[in-house]
Image: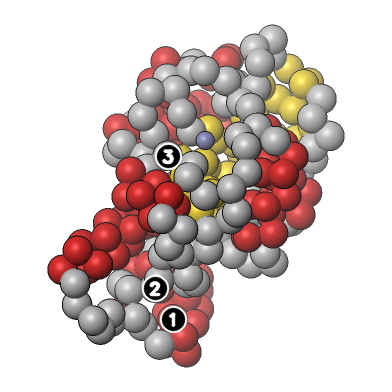
Amino acid sequence: MKLSEYELREKLIKVARKCFQYRLMAGTWGNLSVRFDREKVLITPSGFEKTALKPENLLLMDLEGNVLRGDLKPTIETSMHLGIYKARDDVNAVIHTHSPYAMTLSVINEPIPVLTVEFASAVGHEVPVTGFVLPGTKDLADEVVKALGEDGVAALIRNHGVVAVGESLEEAYNVAILVEEEARTYFWIMLLGKSEIGRIPTELVEKMRKFFKKDYGQKGKIVLDLE
Ligand SMILES: [Zn+2]
């Protein structure tokens, strides 16, 4: 069922609250967007704590960066969000977090390997780290688009945080959560100092990813508590 613009605004705000409650975003950092009517996006404004957001605070923009509705200043990472939508027809939601364990790995330039079955299923690839780029720049947008590639769903921005994408807000949120969980698992494994790390073989990762896309959830969809 296709949501109206207002319903989609409400949904994005609920997902933003979940990101904040789960500590994927602290203070005013992090931003979210969702595609509406293919060529437009709803996006969070700059400088808002996510629990302070109301549906009318979101900006409706076209993919060229023109504001179609709203009078607030959009997030400084708007060009990154729009760049991803332009590069990837399959992406309908983008979530950028500063979640702490993933941030730690982004600072030491350490990609997140595939270690757990849930990560293999819902993400399905090692999460690369971009080069260092200044926030809010076209360079950041280009680096992230390059790191995501043709079908990646997550990337780390060096010294900065996480970008998670999906076919829906639910999927992008699920990826953002799992990136943080996998980063935490990897952090503790490294701290334990084991010489052998139990990475899942690539062919099994691909199998799990295929299974997840086709047979997991409800007709390929996952359900979040958005009340
Ligand atoms: Zn950021």
Q: Is residue 129 above or below residue 25?
A: below
> Horizontal and vertical percent for residue 54?
49, 16
Quarter-of-image position of residue 74:
top right
Q: Is residue 160 above or below residue 222?
A: above
User: Mark 1 sits on what residue?
Assistant: 205
Cα–Cα gap, marks 2 and 3: 20 Å
Provide the residue designation for mark 3: 98
Spatial CA span between label 3 and label 1:
26 Å
Can residue 160 be seen from the camera position used here?
yes
Q: Are marks 2 and 3 in contact (CB under 8 Å)?
A: no
Dot 2: element = loop
Which residue is painted at 66% across and 16% down in the image? 73
Question: Which quarter shows the C terminus?
Answer: top left
Mark seen at residue 214? none
Q: Residues at badges 3 and 1 in contact (C-beta under 8 Å)?
A: no
For the view shown, which residue lies furthest in the top direction? 71
Task: Please tell me which of labels 3 and 1 falls first in the chain.
Answer: 3
**Which of the pair 93/64 is nearer the observer?**
64
Ligand 1 is within 8 Å of the C-beta of the residue at disc 3? yes
Q: Identity of the amino acid at label 2?
A: Val
Image height check: is 216 above or below 55?
below
Marks 2 & 1, CB-CB < 8 Å contact: yes
In this picture, residue 25 sits left or right of residue 209: left
Residue under the image location 15 percent in, 68 percent down: 192
Tell me which amino acid carries mark 1.
Answer: Val
Q: Which residue is mark 2?
A: 114
In the image: residue 184, left or right of residue 122: left
The spot of residue 159 in percent (x, y) is 48, 45
